[in-house]
């Protein structure tokens, strides 16, 4: 039988924080050691306010492009935990504590980030689950999250990539966020990888692979130990809308580079064409 979420929470535990409706929707609880509840947004006026978490977005600007569409983002989602329950209050001290950990993390990450990219700001957005439909019909469109609106907090930073320039913007490395439920693992796409991080086979070098994994592991462990729990939001279970946050139980990385098509340059700088009949 699952236990209440401990306080202090610690890192790498098999944690599930489900909305009250998700409890009756058949989430597989046997995989989790600790289970808590959270409130989704009310379906009618006057209902209880939703419990919230924060999405921290690191904005990476392409310093060789004047097109904002060429900028990139790296984001993590965190729950502020107090006494084993979701704490909706975020103080300036909370935001700065997280930003400090992100700054240390990026000090390492920039060593293998494409040199034309510079992280210029950290934005924090409020996240909350929208109400689930009373009678779900398979195939029905469901709004899973409340609209975040503009960031509720931001901080200017200056973290310059130093990993070489000769990489297309859509080429990156990924970190897998492991959870207790294998089908609901998360994945995070890093900024464009630096050319110096890639070997002659087109793979991450073993040294870079180990360093990236260590920096992610250190970041998530430090945040969880400070009661800012890194989570992977889930919206479906067994093909039924099910809203829950899963604690991250581990991270892993491989040497295969990934491609994010939406990061391709938005506009060509030159166009050539041969005559056509």
Image (tube, rainbow, N blue to C red):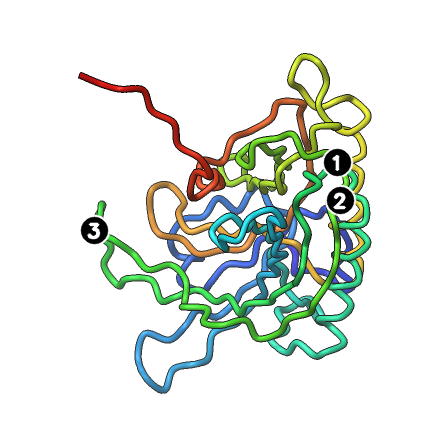
Find the distance from the CA under tag 3 to the CA under tag 1: 49 Å
Of the two numbered discs 2 and 3 in the rendering, the one whose residue sits closer to the viewer:
2
Give yes or no for contact between labels 3 and 1 (Cβ–Cβ under 8 Å). Answer: no
Residue picked out by circle 2: 110
Which residue is at the far bottom? 46
Residue 163's tag is: 1
Q: Residue 91 falls in which quadrant of the image? A: bottom right
Is residue 1 visible from the viewing direction of this image? Answer: no
Residue 38 in view (yes/no) = yes
Q: Residue at x 79, y 63 (%)?
A: 100
Residue reaching furthest to the front: 275
Residue labelled with disc 3: 137
Which quadrant: the C terminus?
Answer: top left
Q: Earlier in the sequence, mark 2 or mark 1?
A: 2
Q: Residues within 10 Å of mark 3 (few under 14, many from 20)?
A: few
Give the number of the mark in front: 3 or 1.
Answer: 1
Mark 3 and mark 1 lie on one chain; the one further toward the N terminus is 3
Q: Camera-side residue: 104 or 13?
A: 104
């Amino acid at each position: 039988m699952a236990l209440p979420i401990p306080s202090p929470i610690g890192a790498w535990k098999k944690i599930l924080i489900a909305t009250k409706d998700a409890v009756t929707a058949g989430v597989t609880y046997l995989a989790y050691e600790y289970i808590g509840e959270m409130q989704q947004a009310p379906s009618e006026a006057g209902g209880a306010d939703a419990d919230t978490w924060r999405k921290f977005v690191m904005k990476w600007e392409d310093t060789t492009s004047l097109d904002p569409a060429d900028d990139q983002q790296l984001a993590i989602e965190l729950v502020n935990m107090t006494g084993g329950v979701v704490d909706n209050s975020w103080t300036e001290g909370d935001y700065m504590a997280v930003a400090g950990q992100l700054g240390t993390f990026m000090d390492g990450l920039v060593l293998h980030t494409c040199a034309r990219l510079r992280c210029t700001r950290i934005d924090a957005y409020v996240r909350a689950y929208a109400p689930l439909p009373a009678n779900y019909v398979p195939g029905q469109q469901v709004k899973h999250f409340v609209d975040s609106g503009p960031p509720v907090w931001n901080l200017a930073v200056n973290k310059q990539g130093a990993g070489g320039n000769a990489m297309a913007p859509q080429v990156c490395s990924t970190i897998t966020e492991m959870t207790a439920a294998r089908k609901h693992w998360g994945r995070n796409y890093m900024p464009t990888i630096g050319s110096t991080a890639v070997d002659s086979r087109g793979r991450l070098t073993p040294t870079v692979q180990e360093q990236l994994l260590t920096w992610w592991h250190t970041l998530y462990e430090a945040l969880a130990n400070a009661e800012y729990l890194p989570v992977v939001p889930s919206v479906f279970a067994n093909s039924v809308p099910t809203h829950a946050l899963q604690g991250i139980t581990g991270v892993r990385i491989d040497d295969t580079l990934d491609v994010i098509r939406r990061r391709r340059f938005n506009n060509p700088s030159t166009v050539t064409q041969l005559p056509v009949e």
